[in-house]
Amino acid sequence: MVVGIPKEIMHAEARVAASPETVKKMIADGNTVLFERGAGLGSFYSDEAYAEAGATLISDCEEIFNKSDVILKVKEPLFNQAKNKHEVDMMHKGQYLITFLHPASPVNHKMVQDMADKGIIGLTLDGIPRISRAVSNR
């Protein structure tokens, strides 16, 4: 399986969908990981750390979307100004997207419908119940 990790494009989003440690685990499990150059810098992970973990570094996010079976993101797909197209438009039928989609939010309804129309399978992390041990007691 090919796992793609593009750089987050939401303004001021510094997180990345996988650390070098998790990339190393994915590769140990037999996956190929395509990682967009610079995607980890906001989280203080260098491209070199991802390369050492075994990821293939790619400069063009569209190549990652095109070649991956699964896309891991932190935030929902957005319009990519640099590519002048929406991230959903770079995805393909049968591809899995694992992220926070917020499908109930009215602003995301069209994006979710576009994913469905293209045959993209969205696994939204905001739909997964959290156990009480995962929430800190305040």
Image (cartoon, rainbow, N blue to C red):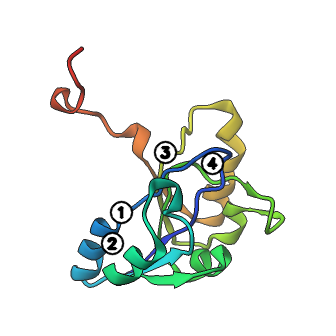
Residue 27: x and y, percent? 29, 81
Marks 1 & 2, CB-CB < 8 Å contact: yes
Disc 2 crowd rating (10 Å Cα; few below 14, some 14-19, many 20+) is many
Residue at the far left in the pictured view: 133
Residue for point 20% across, 18% down:
137
Q: Which amino acid does label 1 sit on?
A: Ser
User: Helix, strand, or loop for circle 2?
Assistant: helix
Q: Name the residue under label 1.
A: 19
User: Helix, strand, or loop for circle 1?
Assistant: loop
Q: Mark 4 points at which residue?
A: 112
Marks 3 & 2, CB-CB < 8 Å contact: no
Decide which of tag 3 and tag 4 comes sooner along the chain: 3
Task: Give the alpha-carbon distance from disc 2 to disc 4, as whole Å.
Answer: 27 Å
Task: Give the alpha-carbon distance from disc 4 to disc 1, as whole Å.
Answer: 27 Å
Residue 120: x and y, percent? 56, 63
Residue 62: x and y, percent? 67, 76
User: Helix, strand, or loop for circle 3?
Assistant: loop
Decide which of tag 2 and tag 4 comes sooner along the chain: 2
